[in-house]
Image (spheres, rainbow, N blue to C red):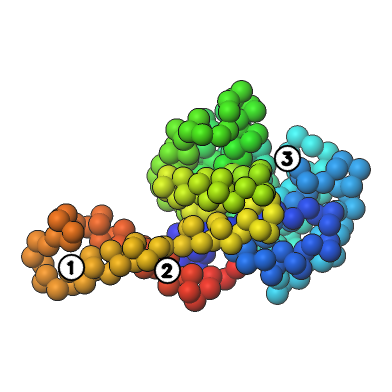
Amino acid sequence: MSENSKPYRSFLFVPGSRPERFEKALHSGADAVILDLEDAVAPEDKEGARQTIAAWLAPERAILVRINPASTPWYEQDAQLGKLRGVAGIVLPKAESARDVTDLISRIKRQVPVYPLIESAKGMWNALEIARAPCVHQLMFGTLDFGADMNMETDGDSLDTFRAQLTMISRVADIHAPIDGVTPSIDDAELLQAETIKAKRFGFAGKLCIHPRQVSIVNRTFAPGESELAWARRVLHAFGSANGAAVAVDGKMVDRPVILKAQSILDADRSTRSGTDAV
């Protein structure tokens, strides 16, 4: 994975048909802004929304675009947005095979990062081949659509098995950790925090947001806490002072996985404080 393509914590959806919200989204604190042409835009407004996005795009304010699925009449023209400067990545909904990704890239004809949304049983079954497809940057978990496809509840722990699976698949494919799905209740801060904590515990790198007020909670929850930072500093200090000898911190042996975990926590904190290159 490229050091210059660090994972983001918060991805904020903005309807592609609401240009008055585009600039506000860029100042919301979200690590990435997704201009949405799919669920947030009515069929009769999709053509106009695409034209609005194309006219607004500029290299100095790079964003992601969620296009419509390949099964829709809007897919071909949506995909062409990936050729434009200012598009830092394409969110591909209803991804169910590696062919979905390669078809998209063949239409764009440039190496644009792709964020496949896993939203169905077939997509989950083929998630490893999707993750290994060219240009795939991160997998995203479309929890609501996935739950509907599987006839499962999406709250509680019903989807936890699949969260663990996507984290493992991303690791095996050597791509960034996945992004968890949205919390629809925009006024329930406690629920959002609980679901974000769960995503973090399952190894996810971030979470999709549908309202600007969700961004700060997601960012804060994914940022390392003071206790985590203190532990990481103790581990690296003890290891650095041991001169190759066995060492324990808080009564536990420090080996290579522990050292890597501690370093990743400090790297995440450093990235947060310096400010990642937000999309």
Kindly indicate the quadrant of the structure image that contains residue 169.
top left
User: Tag 3 or tag 1, which sits nearer the N-term?
Assistant: 3
Residue 274 x %, y %: 49, 76
Q: Nearer the viewer, mark 2 or mark 3?
A: 2
Q: CA distance from mark 2 to mark 3?
A: 36 Å
Residue 184 x %, y %: 66, 43
Q: Which residue is the site of mark 3? A: 69
* Label 2 crowd (10 A; few <14 / some 14-19 / many >=20): some
**Closest to the observer, 248 or 126:** 248
**Closest to the observer, 226 or 128:** 226
Quadrant where the image shows the C terminus? bottom right
Q: Residue at x 61, y 32 (%)?
A: 146
Quadrant where the image shows the N terminus? bottom left
Q: Is residue 251 left or right of residue 79?
A: left
Q: Which residue is the site of mark 1? A: 239
Instruction: Give amino acid for label 2.
Output: Asp
Counting the numbered discs, the total is: 3
Q: Does 238 sit above or below residue 106?
A: below
Kindly indicate the quadrant of the structure image that contains residue 225.
bottom left
Residue 152 x %, y %: 58, 25
Instruction: Give amino acid for label 1.
Output: Phe
Q: Is residue 222 left or right of residue 97?
A: left
Residue 212 x %, y %: 68, 59
Say whether marks 2 and 3 touch (CB < 8 Å). Answer: no
Residue pushed farthest top?
151
Instruction: Give amino acid for label 3.
Output: Pro
Q: CA distance from mark 1 to mark 3?
A: 50 Å
Instruction: Specify whether residue 89 is in view.
Output: no
